[in-house]
Amino acid sequence: MKNKPVLNTVFEAAFRLIDHALNDNEYLQPQKLHRLLYLAQAYYGANYHGNMLMPAIFVAEEFGPVEPNLYAVMEECRPDVRLKPVDPKTSHFIESIWAQFGHHTVEHLSMTVCNHPPYTKAYKAGTGTIIPYQELVDFYASVRKSATTPEAKEVVRPRVMQSHKGKPVATTDWLPRRLK
């Protein structure tokens, strides 16, 4: 695992997801935002050898996982935070999370993640318990497709680029197997 997350703050992912919702004429409920961020952190680690998307922790609360710092700051309104540009690969990943999960209701997302072992284990230890990042990565990297949970490799959509002849081609990141 790299020590440095790809994004500098959780706000960089949160505001991009909020903007995707606005572009789709949708209000992004706070609880849904937290579920999407939780899934983004988990699936990023699962897809990119345990690397972190953002410096964020998630705690098990009654209705699902919550990033407590974001929750505290955004309780009243959207704060004025200067966002740094992100690389196209990271931007594409956040778009993929929105495309994969953004159409689901907050109830569906909450029910799904609240039935997954990283959350249930932390919640059994008591509300406010930190959900260990490595448990997120391990679970979402090992999950096999179900009715509610896609495999990690299915979450990141192929990018469309141009071939040397100018024709569109779908590409995905090359990720060599990690040797143990």
Image (cartoon, rainbow, N blue to C red):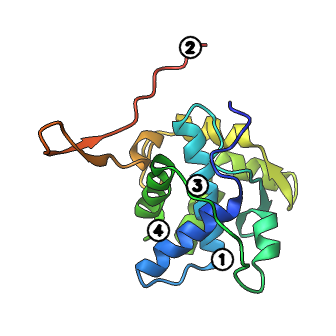
Check residue 39 in the rendering and tell me which mark sits there, or answer none: 3
Q: Disc 3 or 4, which lies upstream in sequence?
A: 3
Q: CA distance from mark 1 to mark 3?
A: 14 Å
In the image, 177 versus 109, the foreground residue is 177
Q: Disc 2 or 4, which lies upstream in sequence?
A: 4
Outermost residue to the top: 180
Q: Residue 82 location, x and y as percent?
A: 68, 69
Q: Disc 1 or 3, which lies upstream in sequence?
A: 1
Q: Is residue 11 left or right of residue 19?
A: right
Residue marked by disc 2: 179
Residue contact between numbered discs 1 and 4, judged by CB atoms under 8 Å: no
The answer to whether 117 is drawn above or below residue 47 in the figure is: below
Q: Residue 96 location, x and y as percent?
A: 43, 56
Q: Disc 1 or 2, which lies upstream in sequence?
A: 1
Residue marked by disc 1: 30
Q: Is residue 128 left or right of residue 170?
A: right
Q: Quadrant of residue 79?
A: bottom right
Q: CA distance from mark 2 to mark 4?
A: 34 Å
Check residue 109 in the rendering and tell me which mark sits there, or answer none: none
In the image, 142 versus 100, the foreground residue is 100
Query: Quadrant of the image for the C terminus?
Result: top right
Amino acid on which disc 1 is placed: Pro
- Tell me if I can see residue 61 in this picture: no
Q: Residue 78 location, x and y as percent?
A: 69, 81
Q: CA distance from mark 1 to mark 2?
A: 39 Å
The answer to whether 80 is drawn above or below residue 143 in the figure is: below
